[in-house]
Amino acid sequence: MKQMAVENGSSVMEFILMGLTDQPELQLPLLLLFLVNYIITVVGNLSLMNLIYLNPHLHTPMYFFLFNLSFIDFCYSCVFTPKLLMGFTSERNTISYPGCMTQLFFFCFFVNSECYVLTAMAYDRYVAICQPLQYIVIMPPRTCSLLMFGSYLMGFTGAMVHTGCMIRLSFCDSNIIHHYMCDIFPLLQLSCSSIYINELVSSVVVSTVIFLSSLIILISYVLILFNVIHMSTGKGWSKAMSTCGSHIITVGLFYGSGLLTHIKTSSAGSEAQEKFFSVVNTLMVPTLNPLIYSLRNKDVKLALKRTLKRISD
């Protein structure tokens, strides 16, 4: 650990995570709240993954993408939630320099990958609704696998770029991170070397990810809307909306909370606001995704009933 810090010109051996609040009376309630949230996230996403795996009628492109979304949300929550919970039970919540860089890498990897998986899901819905007769031809297992491989590859590339740029910085003054995890901007504030390259690279990478994924999602839904408008039956409209509704809600929560987290304001409560939206993005969205797709989806409800009946028998 010492060698890694010296090689990167950093005298900081560990960071102190300040967490969500410094008020002692809130530590226990928040610990219980986020512990319950973590359990629901883990159980919900693992259950949805198992339902999709165990039920052959869910072995379709839509549920293949949903399986990967649940896998990412499960891993995503495991990156920082255990450390957050530890912070509520210890007076000094520290994380080593290598541990911090590792957490940053996996955070960036899963965030970027989720962006592209949501994009692939939007394209899948476009093909299913606008070109239903060619759906099997356009979205065979090979194409779906390639889309997922591309999503993870792009996520890995983005994470390598962010982490590589962070490792080149020197941390030689304060080691106190005013956050509950090792995120890009809280770390940049601690650097005692120039962060111009980091800010430039972060802006380019984040802008590219958001622009590409948002553009594809927007085009997909515009085309879906045009197709739905020309449907002659109300049944077709209802089916299209029920198919896309869960994905629209998920996209809105993920992108909305993510953008609000990084909007900088000059107000005194900007840090608290940033932490709030970060909690929504990193803790609440992975919890809500399996609930959104389960409660609004007849196929998942049917699979759950069949699985429970199989277990009881």
Image (spheres, rainbow, N blue to C red):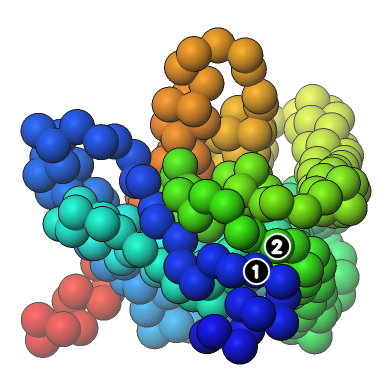
Q: Residue at x 25, y 36 (%)?
A: 22
Residue situated in front as seen by the camera: 227 or 95: 95
| The quadrant where residue 133 appears | bottom right
Residue type highlighted by circle 1:
Ser
Quadrant (top left, top right, bottom left, bottom right) of the C terminus: bottom left
Where 157 falls versus 268 (above or below)? below
Q: Secondary structure at mark 2?
A: loop
Asked whether residue 209 appears in the rendered view, the answer is no
Q: Residue at x 60, y 28 (%)?
A: 260
| The quadrant where residue 132 appears | bottom right
Where 306 falls versus 91 (above or below)? below
Q: Residue at x 49, y 13 (%)?
A: 268
Which residue carries the number 2 mark? Answer: 170
Q: Is residue 31 left or right of residue 230?
A: left
Residue type highlighted by circle 2:
Ser
Where 48 falls versus 59 (above or below)? above
Asked whether residue 53 appears in the rendered view, the answer is yes
Which residue carries the number 1 mark? Answer: 10
Residue 218 on image: x %, y %: 82, 37
